[in-house]
Amino acid sequence: MSGRSGRWWLVVVILPGVVMIAAVLPLIAFRDRYPDPLAVHWSLGGAPNGSMPIAIYSAAMIGGLAAAFVALIAGSFRSLPSAPLTSLVAFIMGLLAAINAQIVVFNLDAASWEDAAPMTPVWLIGVVAAGLVSAWIGWLLAGGTEGIPRDVPIEAVTVSRDTWSGRASNIGLLVVAVLPVLLIVTVSPIVAPLLVCISVAVVVFSSVTVDVDSDGVTISLGPFAWPARHVAHRDITGAAAFEIQPMAYGGWGYRLSSGARAYVIRRGEAIRIGIAAGPDVLVTVDGAAEGAAVIDSLADGRSGGEYPDR
């Protein structure tokens, strides 16, 4: 790490580290001034209606902050992190720090968690504002719009085929999909179905298959090839291959980006397909250069084979 710039240390280590310390310090400093368990949830009317043992709450809060910190370091190992990644991590850490401050203040000197101070709209607005301000600061520190990763074109290849199939997967997302299921035993039965839905959604976006034939291009997600999207060749204006970073599109999953609808499974090779009457379609897939060449050779209605670079 000796070759890192001062700005890298500031953005990736110093500021996130200060936020973590500032968030955790009240848990230690005021340990004897709040009840165990703590009030951690409030009703719409403002009264506390949920609690958690201090040890579990502390582990969850520190774990959430640490996970965001690790994600920032992992995403910036080679260079300054992208503005979207920095902004997202700053939002999460700022939000968690504000939530922790609220919980500590509301439980301070309460005889039991039921006696914690009532929630007020001002506090709720303040928590959200803390997250948004943190995100804005992170965005600026990472360079703003100049810190958005750019797609790097992959050299085109020549093919003589009229069919092609490619696939991409992300084992890491399968691991992430397990986490919500593990939390089911710790939450209310009302919340459990939501956690299951989150796990299923992550599994769906853990892999993608792209099939090209005489009828068009079919993009299928997940182990059951559903949901799927089919694009006829007559609707395609061209295709090209790029090296992409997920944070250029706001992360993993199905992303609504400027000028594109992106299926982002992992970083690396991707095909961007120009659509005549709508936003482009981008999908991360292995063998993207060959796939793009096949799509390009079969597509009808292209304007001289030109493809607009992102």
Image (tube, rainbow, N blue to C red):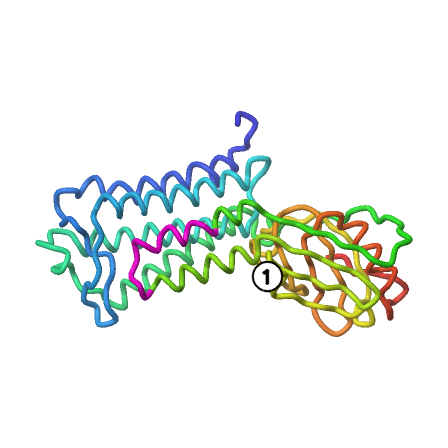
Q: Position of residue 182 (x, y in %)?
A: 38, 50
Residue 189 in magenta stretch: yes
Horizontal placement of 278 versus 295: left or right? left
Horizontal placement of 309 versus 41: left or right? right
Residue 132: image quadrant is: bottom left
Residue at x-position 40% and y-position 54%: 181
What residue occupies the far top of the structure in this picture? 2
Residue at x-position 23% and y-position 43%: 55
Q: Magenta stretch: give its range.
A: 177-190
The correct choice, above or below, for 173 with respect to 47 in the image is above
Residue type at mark 1: give it: Arg
Horizontal placement of 244 versus 205: left or right? right
User: Observer-nearest residue: 43 or 220?
Assistant: 220
What residue occupies the far bottom of the structure in this picture? 277
- Position of the C terminus, as image quadrant, is bottom right
User: Observer-nearest residue: 285 or 189?
Assistant: 189
Q: Position of residue 216 (x, y in %)?
A: 79, 66
Counting the numbered discs, the total is 1
Q: Position of residue 49 (x, y in %)?
A: 20, 64
Query: Which residue in the protein does label 1 denote?
Result: 255
Horizontal placement of 43 versus 289: left or right? left
Residue at x-position 45% and y-position 36%: 13
Q: Secondary structure at mark 1?
A: strand
Q: Majority secondary structure of the magenta segment?
A: helix
What residue occupies the far left of the structure in this picture? 111
* Residues packed near mark 1 inside 10 Å, few (<14), some (14 to 19) or many (20 plus): some
Residue 261 in magenta stretch: no
Q: Position of residue 120 (x, y in %)?
A: 23, 67
